[in-house]
Structure formats: structure tokens, C-alpha cells
Amino acid sequence: MIDPSLRAVLRSRYTIRRFFISFSSLLAVLMLLLLVISAYVPADSTLREAIINFLGNFAANVAIFLCTYAFYVFITSPELRNAEVIPLRNVEIGEEIIDLPAAASDYWFWGRTGSYFRKDVLPRLDRLAHEERKRVRIRVVIPDPDRDGNSQLYMHFKRGLGEEANEHTLAANVIFTIARLVSTSMRNPYLAIEIGLCPTVPVLMGAFFLWRRSKAEESAKVANARLHRDTLLYEHIKAGKREYDWRRRDESIQARKDGELVFETAHMAAYNVSHFAESRIGFYFKDIDEYGLYGFFAGEPGEYYDSYYRTDSTFKEEGRLLTRHDD
């Protein structure tokens, strides 16, 4: 960090003027020396090449200094170039705002919807401007609720923090913040407030971690629910296959057309399903309102494969089952 007193010296008009005059003069002298040496020193001289290399590198460094300082002075706006920026975390704003230097005139706030700002910070600045009778400019940057995804993202963040929120929470808070800013500035002639909309929702790392953790917990719940449903369907298909084998031994089950009912009980119905490679049976289980598909494939002698799928009423869809029996 540069000492504040040294920063003040570097930013003064006197320093800027002296710097450009001195370094521009030095660059002009170096360029003149390079021109003179190139014109009057013999081309085959070793000393000529060494001096030109040295002066050329020196002139290039001086030019870099000039360009860098010129960019700093002329591109950066005066109010930012001469400003002392004091970044504060949200928990420090309310306490530190009254300890800012008396000469401070511009305040920037960039957060989520400005709820903490409008409740604690804005009243302090309002009182400060009234009591000191000084003009205070406030710039507030809040997320744009009309941007795609911002409302949903903000909703998930709030829920990750354990707070209630829906898709309209962001828009409601932003409108409330804007209304509070407008009403305050209309009552206080010393306040000048500018409002900007940010295309994204700023996120604190802690909030982001909690949101990610909540999303992971939601994903785990979804995965557990699917595992339970798939395991239940898998066990029903195995039971249906045993019922089918028992009826095939004791009854004459004839070959039927694709999709034709084979048998039906109080709990399930079995259907014939045609397939180019497997022998398949489709099931509808009434108690769980699910469709299942069993397939049998005979490969090399002694190699047999069973397959179990989730399907629909057409028995054409094949959804892999994730069960607790999988290794």
C-alpha cells in the first residue's frame, strides 16, 4: 500500500506537470542522441551498436512510463483518480458510515436488493446531509429483476440462507428500495441519488456455499426418492416374473400378439411384448400405478441375461432402474 500522503503528492497538478515535462524532455534527448549516433558513427563500429541498444532500451522504458502515467491521469476520471476508496462489508457499513472522513461526498453501494442499505445506512446518510448541510451523492447498484434467471437465482439464495422467498421476492425488494431512495431524496435537497441496475445478482461466498449445500441436499433427496421407486418397481417386476413362470407351468399360455394381455390378477396385469433380441413381458402394477418391463436374453451356451426397465403403457420406452441391489 502507498502511504496516503505520498498518494496525494503523486496526484497533485505540480507533480503531474513536472513528471511530463521531465520525462518528455528526457525522451526527446534520447531520441536525438539515437539520431546523431546513427547518422555520424560508422556502421561497422561495435561501440555504435552497443550505444544504440542501450539508448534504445532506455528510451523504450521512458516511453512506457509516460504512457502508463498518461493513462492513469487522462483516462481515469478526476473524481475517481483523487478518491480514497474504503470498501466495507455489509456488517460494517452501519457502524463505519459515521466515521468516514468529513470530506467524503460520494457513496457507492453494490449489494443484492439493498434491504440492509435502506434500513440502516440510508437513514444515517440522510441525517448526515441534514445536520452538516452538505451535498451527498449516493450511487446504488442493485440487480435487474427483469433479467432472465435473476429472480430464480435470488430465490434459491434466500432459501439457502433459510429465508422464505419466491420468484417475486427480488422484484418486490428492488421496487421497495427504489421507492425508499426516491422518497428520501425528495425530502432532502442535499441528497443526490443515482440508481443503476446490475445484470447479475451479487452473491456473498457464505450465501453461495449455503445455496450450493441446499441444492446438494435437494439433489440427494431426489436421488433417494428415485432409488426407492426404482427398487420397489424392480421387486414388483421380479414378483410378476415369478407369477408368470408359475402360470406358464400350470396353464397353457399360448403365444400372443404384441401388446396382448397374457393374464390379469387383482394386483397386476401381464402383456406380451415383441422384441428383436429378447423375450419380453410387460407388467402393469395396480398398487403402485407403474409399468415395468422384463427381458430375457440367451447368449453363448450357459450365458443368460435378465433386464429390468421402467416403461409406459406402450412398453416401448426403456428406463434403466437404479436399485439398492446394484453393486
Image: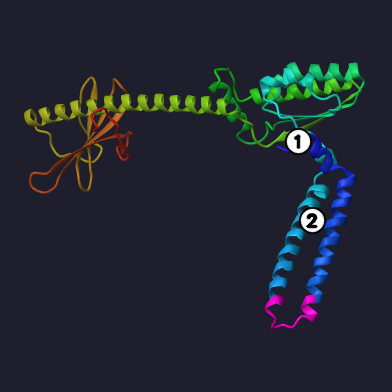
Which color mode does the image show?
Answer: rainbow
- The residue that mark 2 highlights is 66
- The residue that mark 1 highlights is 3
Is 9 positioned to the left or the right of 259 in the image? Answer: right
For the record, the magenta segment spans 37-48
- In which quadrant is the N terminus drawn? top right
Residue at screen point 74% across, 24% down: 175
The type of residue carrying mark 2 is: Leu
Q: Give the mark toward the camera: 2 or 1.
A: 1
User: In the displayed structure, would residue 190 be above or below residue 18?
Assistant: above
Q: Nearer the viewer, residue 202 or 269?
A: 202
Q: Is residue 38 magenta?
A: yes
Q: Nearer the viewer, residue 147 or 177?
A: 177
Q: Nearer the viewer, residue 161 or 242?
A: 161
Residue 217: give x, y in percent of width and height.
Answer: 44, 24
Q: Quick one: label 2, few (<14), some, or many (20+) residues within 10 Å?
A: some
Is disc 2 placed on a helix, strand or loop?
helix
- Between the residue at mark 2 and the residue at mark 1, the CA separation in whole angstroms equals 22 Å
The type of residue carrying mark 1 is: Asp
